[in-house]
Amino acid sequence: MAEIIIHNAGKTYGKTTIMQGIDLHIANGEFVVILGPSGCGKSSLLRMIAGLEEISEGQIQIAGTVVNALEPRERGCAMVFQNYALYPHMTVAENIGYALKVAGVAKAERLARVQATAASVGLGDFLDRKPGQLSGGQRQRVAMARAIIREPKVFLFDEPLSNLDAKLRVQMRHEIRKIHNRIGATSIFVTHDQHEGMTLADRLVVMNKGTIEQIGTPSEIYDQPASLYVAGFIGSPAMNILPGHVSIARRGVVLEDDSEVPVALPAGLPDGHLVQLGIRPEHATLVAPGQGSFDARLDMIEELGATRQCNLIFEDIPFCLLTEDRPALHPGATVGVRVAPERVHLFDAGTGRRIAPATAAVRQGREQPVS
Amino acid sequence: MRRACFKFSWIAAALLAPQLLIIFIFFYWPSAQALYWAFTLEQPWGGGNTWVGFDNFTKVLSDPYYWGSVRVSVIYALATTVIAMGMALTLAIFVDRQLAGYRAYRVGIIWPYAVAAPAVGLAFQFVFNPGAGIFSYINTIAPGWWDLSKYPWQAVTAIVIAGAWKQVAYSFIFFLAALQSIPRSLTEAAAMDGARPLRRMVDMQLPLLTPTFFFLLVINITDSFTDSFGIVDTLTGGGPFRATDLMVYKIYADGFRGFDYSGAAAQSIILMLLVMALTFVQFRYVERRVHYT
């Protein structure tokens, strides 16, 4: 069990800086998911914690020890790799027990522990097989068992579910969370899949281009995205972003076609300030033309079963909206869009950062019964 | 296993013909000729031969010089294979670990493969020359101690070193390719599991190299039985006292110097059977213990 403190960590390859200024404090027993698109540096960060990559600057501490100069084996971390990295020439039992064998654990104890661990992940009957004779899900379990058996202080997962099919991925996701709850080791899980991130994490770390965009619980990140980047990355379908400017007189944001969206404007925001308005698809409703905040043209309706996804076009910008109704509309029709003012996110058009006081509006919004 | 079936076509036959013709003329025809000669007594200047059955084989197999030749051939094959593969593996591991300057010596190690056997023999003729080469320094300390043309064990050592030197390159290329095809994540997983570099080499790299190892074993042993003529001819000429009279060299010497075509043909057949038997044994018994992943 260990807490991990990352202070101002950075990574450079030659003259290229791929990561800088990473500050992250992970509490003992916490399950943290690092989320970001490919190439954002999330895997590199994980590998730096594991000791598989050098730390170019800054400091990483595991359980109170600075590990910058330590070998992977001295850091007490176990890792599950994306392609599982099972030893192809060893049986399942040998794969799971390899770390113990290297550590010099006596054969009898080793066998007992291998059997117990294998049984705990449902591999009891496969101990004599080679990895080549296993299915994808079973290989995944071997990789998990190999990490579990070492009783590590820290569990590292490098996109472990990305090679599985959709159904198995959901199932393994639940199992990983259950195993975490049982073992309680500090866990860091890297993924580009926001569903994995949202469902698994105690806390999410959203990364972009080698820096951390936001750290928070899944609901914090969903409800109060710190930047346009996070707002667009988390949530499916993605948040709609509309450009506009602040109008004190009209108590809201004026859009490009001069229609206005009422927003609880934070104090001190100058009149005419350029902003980006963020509206989640589930926070906008379809109304008759002229009745809502603005009018848009219907492009297409996609049936999702429980809801319908209406793809609208507003001033050449796509705008997506989810509704539980079955609107009797044809593509090309003009519709009105009503936006709940307390659900609107406001971002600075220049910096892309969230304009802070709008948070209060969301908090108020959350306390209101959802109609 | 799926099989593709093709209908007979004259175009296909025509396209295959040149290759088949070459194989026939340069392999099957001479082999058949050798087989025929092995059972006849051929006159050195041509003009008739007599069927003698197995007489040629009995004569060869009852010749103590022939058994001496078999003995030294086996020693040569084993020694060159062990040295060449050992060196190749060591060098490949160094290059794979990307120790300082590996780009330079990677190219350097591959070059010897492009050198023809007689050229290798000639080069080592200078190296091992008791009067002029590097080894001549030994003779300045202990006069007369080093002389290839005098001491059988020195002559054998010399052809073994030259032969191994030539074969290192080939094995090196294959070992390096095999090492680099081992996924990096495997080594990393082993590192996470607590294994140090040497342990990782023994537990991960070497077992995963076994298919390559087996392939190279077959190639190297076959090569050292059949492809050593150039080195022996230029370096020792089979001497001293027939100490380096390898089977291929003896075939040449008996056939083209002694004009005993029939005896040489019989020896060729024996060598061919020996190489086939060795390959069979290797595939039958060694391959079983090889991990194919």
Image (tube, coloured by chain):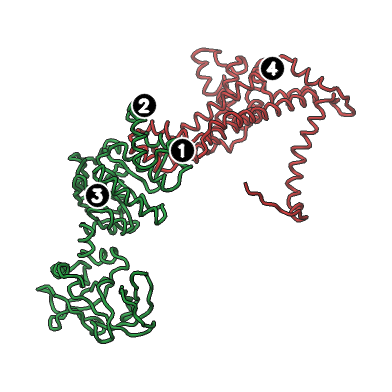
Chain colours: A green, B red
Q: CA distance from mark 4 to mark 2?
A: 51 Å
Query: Residue A332: percent from the left, percent from the top?
Result: 38, 84
Q: CA distance from mark 2 to mark 3?
A: 33 Å
Q: Nearer the viewer, mark 4 or mark 1?
A: 1
Q: Amino acid at mark 2?
A: Lys
Which mark identifies residue B67?
A: 4
In this figure, which residue is indicated by the disc labeled 2? A107
For the point 22% across and 54% down, the residue is A203
User: Does dot 1 land on a helix, a strand or a loop?
Assistant: loop
For the point 71% across and 16% down, the residue is B65
User: Does dot 3 land on a helix, a strand or a loop?
Assistant: strand
| For residue B38, above or below residue A6 | above
**Chain to which the residue tagged by mark 1 belongs:** A
First along the sequence among labels 3 and 1? 3
Q: Is residue B273 left or right of residue A214?
A: right
User: Does dot 2 land on a helix, a strand or a loop?
Assistant: helix
B56 or A296: which is nearer to us?
A: A296
Query: Is there one chain holding both mark 2 and mark 3?
Result: yes
Q: Nearer the viewer, mark 3 or mark 1?
A: 1
Q: Amino acid at mark 1?
A: Arg
Q: CA distance from mark 4 to mark 1?
A: 49 Å
User: Does dot 4 land on a helix, a strand or a loop?
Assistant: helix
Location of residue A206 by image quarter: bottom left
Q: Quick one: label 3, few (<14), some, or many (20+) residues within 10 Å?
A: many
**Chain to which the residue tagged by mark 3 belongs:** A
In this figure, which residue is indicated by the disc labeled 1? A129
